[in-house]
Image (cartoon, rainbow, N blue to C red):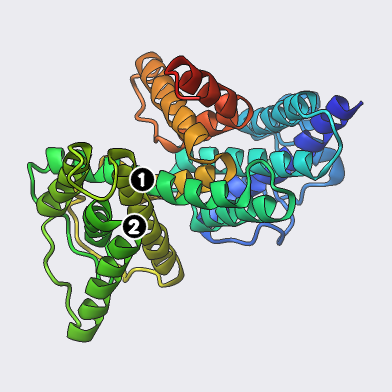
């Protein structure tokens, strides 16, 4: 019963997600005005909006003008219904946990298709999802506890920001990225560098101090990415020789947390204070978009850091496999990360435990 209800609810939610996917990136309201046929403008009635069935009954055409309706609509409805049903089957209890899992699923589907269409991951969905993950952890301790949700969000965002940083360093042969004012990626890397040597609190304090100086001087202080990123690595290496009060794992953990605090706080700043319209033509090579960093933060809040690594591994694996299958079109990384996150929600913790047991660590 619950599985069937999950499918029906998912199909209806999927119908709403189609509206979100279509309208949210354009900055339009997702509740108003009511849906219309984009070709003839005829307002759609209840009969036109029965999930999946309308599309099948009217054979993928508008009932009023005959214009073809994309198969994407029933696909999203079917996918949402299928995943809601699967979630109800894997979590067979009609409780708050299932509602949270359904919300997580809906967010990931909306994010994936918007990323496929526009190469963006809207802040409202990533930060909204992160906040919902923290609420779930605080109120129900589900899917993970409060501490695991926070550290997961920060370390996951920090990890992705740093992967992007090191990849950019290689792509740009050591050149620094354009400085951000008042806060940019260079402050994320600075936080990582100081965090690796002295602990995450000092890393965050160092980044905050430079941001405050930027504001006081009204210009960005130069910070060389190659120096900060090398210093971060060096901190972990020195820690591995026992020369720091931190062990190597503590050093890496503090580096990730410090980077994550600055990445998510800086991202939130830019989400709330939109960047001035820039008419600079040449895009810098960015190995990983900053939207992926925020999505990683959201996934970390839902999964905890260990299972997030499972999600990241699954995403890289799926990206490699599907990338080979669909060579023609460059797909963004967000949908892979979302897929990995959904898989890791169910099996991530188990896989982490099995791996730690294999290493003899638990
Ligand atoms: Zn029409």
Distance from Cα at disc 2 to Cα at disc 1: 8 Å
Which residue is at a point 41% across and 69% down the rendered structure image? 269
Is residue 319 rendered to the left or right of residue 34?
Answer: left
Residue 213 appears left or right of 160? left
Q: Is residue 348 above or below residue 285?
A: above
At a point 34% along the width and 56% down the height, the residue shown is 258
Provide residue 212's location: percent of width, then percent of height.
27, 78
Furthest toward the right, the residue is 1
The picture places residue 124, in percent across and down from the top left corner, at 55, 58
In the image, taking residue 225 as reference, residue 250 lies left or right, namely: right
Residue 283 against residue 215 in the figure, above or below: above
Circle 2 sits on which residue? Answer: 200
Residue 253 — which label?
A: 1
Q: Residue at x 21, y 77 (%)?
A: 214
Q: Is the residue at mark 1 in contact range of ligand 1, meaning its CB lies under 8 Å from it?
A: no
Q: Is residue 305 left or right of residue 14?
A: left
Residue 176 visible in image: no
- Of the residues under marks 2 and 1, which one precedes in the sequence? 2
* 154 or 172: nearer the viewer: 154
* Local crowd size for mark 1, using a 10 Å CA cut-off: few (<14), some (14–19), many (≥20): many
Q: Which mark is residue 221?
A: none
Question: Cβ–Cβ below 8 Å for labels 2 and 1?
Answer: yes
The N terminus lies in quadrant = top right
Residue 60 on image: x %, y %: 69, 27
């Amino acid at each position: 019963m619950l599985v069937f209800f999950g499918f029906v609810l998912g199909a209806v939610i999927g119908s709403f997600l189609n509206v979100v996917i279509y309208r949210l990136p354009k900055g339009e309201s997702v509740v108003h005005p009511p849906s219309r046929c984009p070709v003839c403008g005829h307002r759609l009635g209840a009969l036109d909006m029965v999930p999946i069935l309308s599309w099948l009954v009217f054979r993928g055409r508008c009932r009023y003008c005959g214009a073809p309706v994309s198969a994407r609509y029933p696909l999203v409805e079917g996918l949402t219904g299928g995943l809601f049903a699967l979630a109800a089957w894997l979590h067979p209890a009609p409780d708050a946990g299932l509602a949270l899992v359904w919300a997580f699923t809906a967010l990931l589907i909306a994010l994936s298709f918007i990323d496929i269409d526009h190469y963006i991951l809207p802040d409202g969905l990533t930060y909204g999802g992160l906040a919902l993950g923290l609420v779930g952890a605080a109120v129900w301790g589900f899917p993970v506890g409060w501490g695991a949700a926070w550290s997961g969000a920060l370390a996951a965002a920090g990890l992705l920001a740093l992967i992007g940083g090191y990849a950019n360093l290689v792509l740009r042969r050591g050149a620094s990225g354009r400085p951000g004012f008042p806060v940019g990626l260079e402050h994320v890397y600075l936080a990582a560098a100081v965090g690796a040597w002295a602990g995450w609190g000092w890393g965050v304090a160092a980044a905050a101090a430079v941001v405050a100086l930027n504001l006081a001087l009204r210009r960005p202080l130069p910070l060389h990415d190659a120096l900060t990123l090398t210093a971060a690595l060096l901190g972990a290496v020195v820690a591995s020789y026992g020369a720091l009060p931190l062990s190597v794992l503590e050093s890496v953990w503090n580096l990730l947390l410090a980077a994550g605090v600055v990445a998510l706080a800086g991202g939130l700043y830019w989400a709330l204070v939109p960047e001035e319209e820039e008419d600079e033509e040449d895009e810098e090579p960015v190995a990983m978009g900053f939207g992926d960093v925020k999505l990683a933060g959201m996934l970390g809040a839902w999964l905890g850091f260990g299972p997030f690594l499972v999600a990241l591994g699954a995403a890289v694996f799926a990206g490699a496999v599907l990338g080979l299958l669909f060579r023609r079109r460059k797909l963004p990384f967000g949908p892979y990360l979302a897929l990995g996150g959904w898989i890791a929600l169910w099996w991530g913790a188990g896989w982490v435990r099995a791996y730690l047991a294999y290493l003899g660590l638990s």
